[in-house]
Amino acid sequence: PQLRVSLTIHNFANRPSLTPSKGKASNALSLSQTLHFLKPWLLSEHQTVLLGWLCSVISVYSLSKIVSKVGNVSATISSIDAIKLRDEGLVLGGLVIARSVASYGQQAFLWEAALNAVYKLRIHVFDRILQRELGYFEGKDGVSSGDIAYRITAEASDIAETLYALLSTIIPSTLQLSAMMMRMLVISPVLSLISAAVIPCMALVVAFLGQKLSSISRKAHLSIATLSAYLNEVLPAILFVKANNAELCESSRFKRLARIDFFERLNKKRMKAVIPQIIQAIYFGVLFILCAGSIVVSRGSFNGCNLVSFVTSLLFLIEPIQDVGKAYNELRQGEPAIERLFDLTRFTDKEVEKPDAVDLDSVRGEIKFCNVSFEYSEDMSLVLNGLNIHIGAGEIVALVGPSGGGKTTLIKLLLRLYDPVSGCILIDNRDIQSIRLQSLRRHVSLVSQDITLFSGSVAENIGYTDLTAKIDMERVKYAAQAANADEFIRKLPEGYHTNIGPRGSTLSGGQRQRLAIARALYKNSSILILDEATSALDSKSELLLGQAVERLMKNHTVLIIAHRMETVRMANRVFLLDKGKLEELPRSTILGGHKDSLLSSGVVI
Ligand code: ADP
Ligand code: MG
């Protein structure tokens, strides 16, 4: 037993691991590219932004008024003029309320703009992801769904924070900056010029720090996305983990990834803590200007009172400069999130659909593959090699072959999830590349090898293919009966309205398959494909299903991929797909006594 345990752990330790360095790095965008990417989403919110800014102006204005009014009120108190005191008090109260309302308005409007922009951006990104070709998600370079989920959820929320920080700083800071600069210019143009030299120096420092923050932040995003991708992979496989005593191993893998994230995040927080301290160095600039000022004063062209006034303005200048610096850093820090979201949308649309592609109202179901060759990538061998097949409308055809022989691939090509490298595929003598994708996929029902069910009721799952219409319960029940699923569905606590849990996890393998078959029958397309869809059924269920398919699928073309003799026997013709080549087996092989050749090849049991 000891040996077995150590072997198990050894195997798990060697399991391909997700590491941040392996995560999909996004190409860094320049600041202007980042802003360019955000522009349309912000512009679409321009009205809300303008309202928010209007509130900002009112808020800044009322604050300055409040400050001067407080002075007036204190002057009135000393003169003990009750009526004047009341009036001044009322004005001051009004100003305070105005300031509160405006300040609320500023935050409410600007948050609305930022969140709305991100809401639209999210929808855009998700729609783009749905449009991406299957190869983006599959294969050795396929992008992990956990990573994508993290980008669209948490990182998109970070972008809202960034946008808010930008929007809320621009107006008040610019106002305060320009007001103070004007004052300084009036007091002393010479000292203003000297101060003007200090500001660009500070800007350079802030820009440099922003750059650093951006790259540190990028690493932090990658590490948390890796963590999310890891969880997304391991949690759905919890049964397998437990069955193999791999909790400890997975726990240490999680710990390692979490530790990396801890360091990256700490780095980022430290950097964020350092930046404001460095920005404080601006006070040295003030000191420098004070010295320069005292020289000017000593020459007599300027009095001390003016110098105090000038330096006060300068101090008031520091706050908006710091705010602008903070907003800039916020933007740099948000950049990786923006890049990674942008990265999901950045692909050139392949011209999947020809402009003159047609919609087919009805399809007879004749399928032809002419010299079709296909490879998943250039560095891999051909999966299908000059394949020819002709399936007549209404025929039931079985496809057998060793696993990995390319059967599922052939179906993917028929559905145009991939396009052949050479050759063409015809449905009803029409090249499928000239049929609109929506139309093509409407006429083909697929029960795939990996059953896909969603959380929701049984009825919703069976009626999934018809999302636009209201689910027709009569049709749902009819399809379920045909798929031999009605009996077990009725025994569920709420029958057809029972929630089947995430990915249909409350059902057995055979029940899941029957639901998937019922869903395909509900869709009622001219072409039905069962890709190893009956592998988990008992013989009786399979026999009943076979009879239902024969009855229901009269005038429908049915393509059955299977490994069991009983299933294969449903077919009129049988094809063997091996090493990318297709060969029709003589009918005698599937009838009674002559099945030995098929059995001996090992592809059918
Ligand atoms: P079958 O359904 O006959 O068992 P498949 O059509 O699923 O076989 O796979 C045929 C071959 O293509 C296999 O060698 C498999 O490794 C490879 N393959 C399948 N899907 C992909 C993919 N997305 N990227 C790269 N290779 C793939
Ligand atoms: Mg397969």
Image (cartoon, helix red, strand yellow):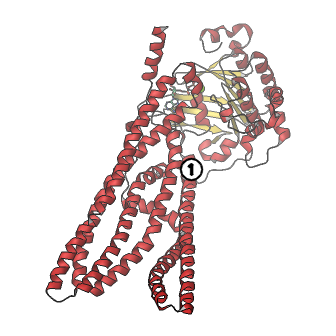
When the figure is inspected, residue 81 is found, relative to residue 241, above or below; the finding is below
Question: Residue 229 appears at what percent x and percent y?
Answer: 49, 37
The residue drawn where x is 35% and y is 64% is 325
Relative horizontal placement of residue 202, taking residue 467 as reference (left or right):
left
The residue drawn where x is 77% and y is 48% is 469
Determine if the C-beta at disc 1 is less than 8 A from ligand 1.
no
The residue drawn where x is 53% and y is 39% is 145
Question: Residue 194 appears at what percent x and percent y?
Answer: 21, 77
Relative horizontal placement of residue 507, taking residue 269 as reference (left or right):
right
Q: What residue is pinned by disc 1?
A: 126
Q: Secondary structure at mark 1?
A: helix
Viewer-closest of 530 and 67: 67
Residue 201, quarter of picture:
bottom left
- Specify the quadrant that holds the C terminus: top right
Viewer-closest of 317 and 443: 317
Three-letter residue code for mark 1: Phe
Relative horizontal placement of residue 571, taking residue 274 as reference (left or right):
right
Viewer-closest of 432 and 536: 536
When the figure is inspected, residue 505 is found, relative to residue 593, above or below; the finding is below
Question: Residue 454 appears at what percent x and percent y?
Answer: 67, 37
